[in-house]
Amino acid sequence: MAGTITKRGAKHKTTPKTGAPHTSKKEANPMWGGQFASGPAEIMATINASIAFDKKLYAQDIGGSLAHCAMLAHCGILTRKEAAAITQGLKKIKQEIESGHFTFKESLEDIHMNIESRLAELIGDVAGKLHTARSRNDQVALDFRLFVRDALEKIDVQLQALQASLLARAEQYAVSIMPGFTHLQTAQPVTLGHHLMAYVEMFGRDRARVQSLRERMNESPLGSAALAGTSFPIDRVMTAKLLGFAHPMANSLDGVSDRDFALEFLSIASISAVHLSRLAEEFIIWSSAPFNFITLSDLYTSGSSIMPQKRNPDAAELVRGKTGRINGSLMALLMTMKGLPLAYNKDMQEDKEPVFDAFAQWQMVLSAMTGMIQDFTPNVKRMHALAAEGYSTATDLADWLVRTLKMPFRNAHHATAKIVKKAADKKCLLPDLALADMQSVEPRITKAVYGVLTVEQSVASRTSFGGTAPVRVKEAIKAAKAKYL
Ligand code: ARG
């Protein structure tokens, strides 16, 4: 064990990570005030600091501070002059960060204290007045909420672009017939357009979840202060409005300790990733040589270093693979939140990385999938030919017996099974089976039965709402365009 003196009776005298003595040569964090004589142990500084990842929140942090400062001035808690100095300083810091001239310090722990400390360097003591009636607890809750709100808006745009690509391809292949599967066994013929439209619906539900979370989470924690609110005469409605929130959160304890919005974000990401993964899986199967339903171009595939014939669907595999990682982020944050007493606990600093990572991965898989949808070439002839195999119109035959001969469906099912067996014995498809062979099973069958046995006839007949008939698919595309684009 690194840093442990193992001799019996000896104490841990060194930090586990570096072997450095437990005492600290560092100065105490000036933000803490006089209570701390020494700085943290090296490992304490490392485990405690979040700046490496929460610097991503600089714009939200400065935006929140600007609103807080304006409100403090409006309520007479700061003078106009003080507020002006703070505002100018904050804007300068934003420029410094964006131009790469800001030095982030781990010793200042997080983005909030890095910015406040720099503000003091720029404008002096008055910087300290910004934190009046505020705590890092409501500050971080606010920053993170603003980040997630923005992320939801970006994701919605990407989901819409994915839907647009699916719709364009669905339109192109609204009448192209392919096998529909259950249990990955040929079931009934469908159209490729119909199949793609199923995903338009799934991503539509993802978007509905995104939009509903956007609305539900749009309330401001700012002004909850450390946990109990503040004795200063602040105006929480004003800061809420300035930051685009519908209203302030009703309970200050909840305000600083709620991370539902992050959990919901991750669960929506997880469900959406599962949708993407299912589509990716279909592309992987469809592009395999035995299926040969589609070809993915050079843009989204890779070759093998040993097998020259291979074209591997790597992008689709990674869309499928990253689903595990995104769902893992949801699990991570659920476990972090479980059992936390009210209100803020430092455990909650662990909320950001899973969300940042899941967001980045979600964006990436959405882009990759949108690209593949635009890119793939279906092997329309082969899909059509395979749709006719496996007696995929057997249900149409059974339905004909029910409709024309008024047979109970169960009896029709059994008769059809016998006819299918006959066709299999003769090694032919149902439309090619002689009438006499069918009549040997059910004498009342007439040649009119040949009106329902081809895949074209089958697909065209499924005109129920939501069905695969090209007329319905074209209507569905039109409706989805109006609803989603
Ligand atoms: N870095 C902290 C976080 O990300 C900010 C809030 C810290 N609050 C505190 N009282 N230590 O959660």
Image (cartoon, rainbow, N blue to C red):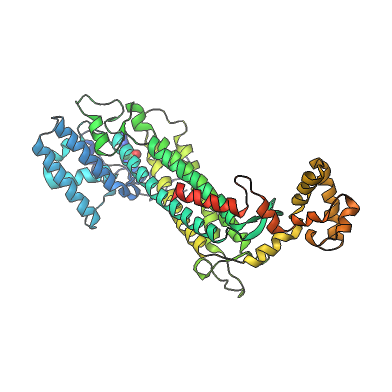
Q: Could you tell me residue 427's position as x and y percent?
A: 83, 63
**Camera sees residue 36:** no
Ligand 1, seen in the image, is in the quarter at top left
Which of the 4 quarters of the picture holds residue 70?
Answer: top left
Image position of 130 (left or right of 428)? left
**112 w.r.t. 396: above or below:** above
Q: Residue reaching furthest left? A: 81
**Camera sees residue 471:** yes
Image position of 407 (left or right of 96)? right
Q: Could you tell me residue 332's position as x and y percent?
A: 48, 42
Image position of 282 (left or right of 327)? right
**Residue at coordinates 22% horizontally, 38% vertically from top-left?**
67
Q: Could you tell me residue 158's position as x and y percent?
A: 42, 53
Which of the 4 quarters of the picture holds residue 240?
Answer: top left
Q: Residue reaching furthest right? A: 440
**88 w.r.t. 291: above or below:** above
**Residue at coordinates 20% horizontally, 44% vertically from top-left?**
117
**81 w.r.t. 453: above or below:** above
Between 315 and 15, the one lying in front of the other is 315
Between 349 and 308, the one lying in front of the other is 308
Q: Could you tell me residue 402's position as x and y percent?
A: 79, 44
